[in-house]
Image (cartoon, rainbow, N blue to C red):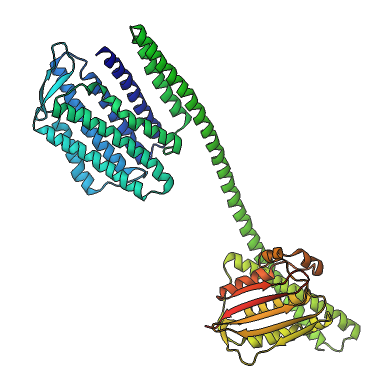
Amino acid sequence: MGILQNLDLLSVGIAIAGTVVLGFAVFLNDRRNFSNRTFLIFSIITAIWGVLNYISYQFNSDLLTLWLLRSVLFLAVLQAFSLYTFLVIFPRDKISFSKTYRFFFLPVAMATAFLTLTPFVFSSFERISIASRVATPITEPGIVLFGVVSIGFVFIGIWSLLKKTRKANWEEKKSLKIVLWGLAIMFFLIIIFNFFFTVGLNDVRFIPFGALFTFPFILLTSYTILKHKLFNLKIAGVSLLIFSLSIVAFGEVIFAEELYLIIYRSSILILVLSFGVLLIQSVMREVRQREQLEILSKELAAANAELKKLDQLKSDFLSFVSHQLRAPLTVIKGYISMIEEGTYGQIPQNIMEVLGKVFVSNEKLIRLVNDFLNLSRIEQGRMQFEFEKTSVATLIEEAVDALKDNAAKRGLTLVWQKPEAVPDITIDKSKVYEIIYNLIDNAIKYTEKGSVSVVLSQKPKSIVIAVKDTGIGLSSDDKKQLFQRFGRIEAGKKVNISGTGIGLYVAKYMVEAQKGRIWAESAGRDKGSTFFIELPLG
């Protein structure tokens, strides 16, 4: 029995140290977390239960032994109930207990726990022999209630964790399954060897190993915490755990009296120290990496927040500047038109030519300001639409008339292939006109020779506007840049240096906002391109 007692002492020391350290490490990591608090309570109760279970057979006093045995049962009820509470809460950090918990489970647990301190459960005990310290309790009917309540709480708690495991995602499920297995193995061993063997078979040989049965839960939970970061332990907690285990193992070496025991316990101490060094080294590496990732994550979040502020400032500035520029440009356009019409008298021809150039430049500025103003509205979500029944053919005709002189100046043929009959559709008239105008204007700008043609056709559920040119064409890479904010192709920069890359981005937004779509097709570079707008009939 001496070897068994020494093995029992070693297992009790390691189990208690590991349980308490693990419980406090989890709790101190986040004191406000309800799951952490409940885990600490469960750990403390388990540790005290392990101590009392060990010392209950270390005394010769009959009265003291009887009360120790009753105390073991008392703590066993609390242990089962605290486990159930932890598994119900876990992994939430806050919870409000149900009425069933407060007015049924809690009173039943407390009543059963205090009942174990009365003769209704253990009336007395008897020893196997005069020299034996292991006591065999004499049970009474109350032991049935103790078994039902304690085992009931255990199985309800495990069932609750099992349900959570089924609903968890893949990563959480791995962690929960490990804890579940640890709980199942631990309480299976306790119930079989510390309850059924003792009460049902009067076999008390396994009582000294009660604390050892908590090892599956302690080890598997520790593995889960360290491997899957379930509770995010820090280096101090792991170091304290290894330190506590080393003290227990070293104490076993000191109290050993025979040589083979000294060798055996010294090997245990070496294993504990070796495992501790490797574990601490591994955890330190993981913690450093995690802290670096947390720092980078915070810096990235701060940078993103700053970028959002800058982006908002840019949008506000863009909107302000666009509004401020639009008014004087409109005034300039008005006065130039009045001068050209002769409102202020006859103007010499050479001045009229200069005014014409000023008017063209002013129109470019107005369109540029409108593009930036539209971009600002899109970014701020302030783009508004006014829908009405409109003839798309009329809008195309107006845009073609407005741009035919530009095409003629570049030596291009602007063709408008008007269909016989296309129904009116519900659209934002001004915005669709702006889109058509920009597409035809772009086709003229990026076509050095040849023609630009506009075709309107009807499909069963939509109408399609096609603007085809014989210009610079598009490569596959060019198509990827189109319709993006400030997206311009390299070939286009050489032909038209004043472009901004905003027009197509705004056009795409406007078309899609009207439940349509816009895209471009091309056979390749220098083979022309065709831009399509499709708008629904309904």
Residue 529 sits above or below residue 297 on the image: below
Q: Is residue 28 visible?
A: no
Out of 386 and 336, give the one closest to the viewer. Answer: 386
Q: How far from the left and from the top, in percent, is residue 113?
A: 18, 33
Toward the top, the furthest residue is 258
Q: Is residue 400 visible?
A: yes
Residue 368 sits above or below residue 127 on the image: below
Toward the bottom, the furthest residue is 420
Out of 240 and 248, give the one closest to the viewer. Answer: 248
When asked about the image quadrant of residue 500, the answer is bottom right
Q: Is residue 78 left or right of residue 120?
A: right
Q: How far from the left and from the top, in percent, is residue 78?
A: 23, 33
Q: How far from the left and from the top, in percent, is residue 6?
A: 30, 15
Residue 168 sits above or below residue 295 on the image: below
When asked about the image quadrant of residue 293, the answer is top right
Residue 272 sits above or below residue 507 on the image: above
Which quadrant would the N terminus be assigned to in this image? top left
Q: Is residue 264 left or right of residue 186?
A: right
Q: Is residue 160 left or right of residue 423?
A: left
Q: How far from the left and from the top, in percent, is residue 405?
A: 80, 84
Q: Is residue 535 left or right of residue 323?
A: left
> Total number of numbered labels?
0
- Residue occupying image coordinates x 67% and y 70%: 504
